[in-house]
Image (spheres, rainbow, N blue to C red):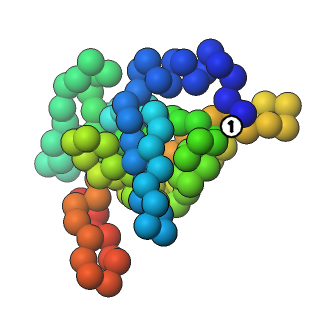
């Protein structure tokens, strides 16, 4: 169970996200932020400035609850916000005294889904 202070921070700093699974839609709050820029000199990859500093527009971090829908966040899950879709690349639970406190994940933008369920990534 997520402590009240942590859940409150996720709700204040985050945004509503949705996961569709088996015909049901699960909605909850989570924080999604751009991954900080790493050295890409000479690669020609875009580097953007944001309130988080230099960012890589191809990678994102997710912080969310381990319950209330957040337990569905795992590698291969598609997360949707009001403006974007993301593919969960990796996901880990942060545990304190044996209990899940929050989930952390690495995300990539999901472009589209085709009929066979294949997801194309940037």
Q: Quadrant of residue 97?
A: top right
Q: Is residue 91 above or below residue 35?
A: below
* Crowd class of label 1 (few under 14; some 14 to 19; many from 20; radius 10 Å): some
Q: Is residue 91 above or below residue 50?
A: below
Residue 57 can be seen, yes or no = no
Query: From the image, which quarter does the C terminus lie in?
Result: bottom left
Horizontal side of 54 relative to 74 (left or right) equals left
Which residue is denoted by mark 1 in the rendering? Answer: 94
Check the image and name the residue furthest to the bottom.
116
Query: From the image, which quarter does the N terminus lie in?
Result: top right
Horizontal side of 28 relative to 117 (left or right) equals right
Check the image and name the residue furthest to the right.
97
**Residue 20: percent from the left, percent from the top?**
42, 59
**Residue 30: percent from the left, percent from the top?**
46, 34
Please report the residue visible at 51 percent of the width from the left and 35 percent of the height from the top.
63
**Residue 99: percent from the left, percent from the top?**
79, 37
């Amino acid at each position: 169970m997520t402590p009240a202070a942590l859940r409150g921070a996720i709700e204040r700093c985050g945004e509503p996200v949705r996961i569709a699974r088996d015909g049901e839609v699960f909605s909850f709050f989570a924080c999604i932020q751009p991954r900080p820029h790493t050295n890409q000199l000479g690669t020609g990859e875009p580097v953007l400035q944001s309130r988080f500093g230099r960012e890589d527009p191809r990678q994102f971090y997710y912080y969310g609850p381990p319950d209330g829908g957040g337990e569905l966040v795992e590698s291969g899950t598609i997360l949707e916000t009001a403006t974007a879709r993301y593919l969960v690349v990796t996901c880990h639970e942060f545990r304190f005294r044996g209990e899940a406190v929050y989930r952390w994940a690495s995300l990539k933008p999901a472009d589209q889904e085709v009929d066979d369920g294949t997801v194309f990534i940037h």
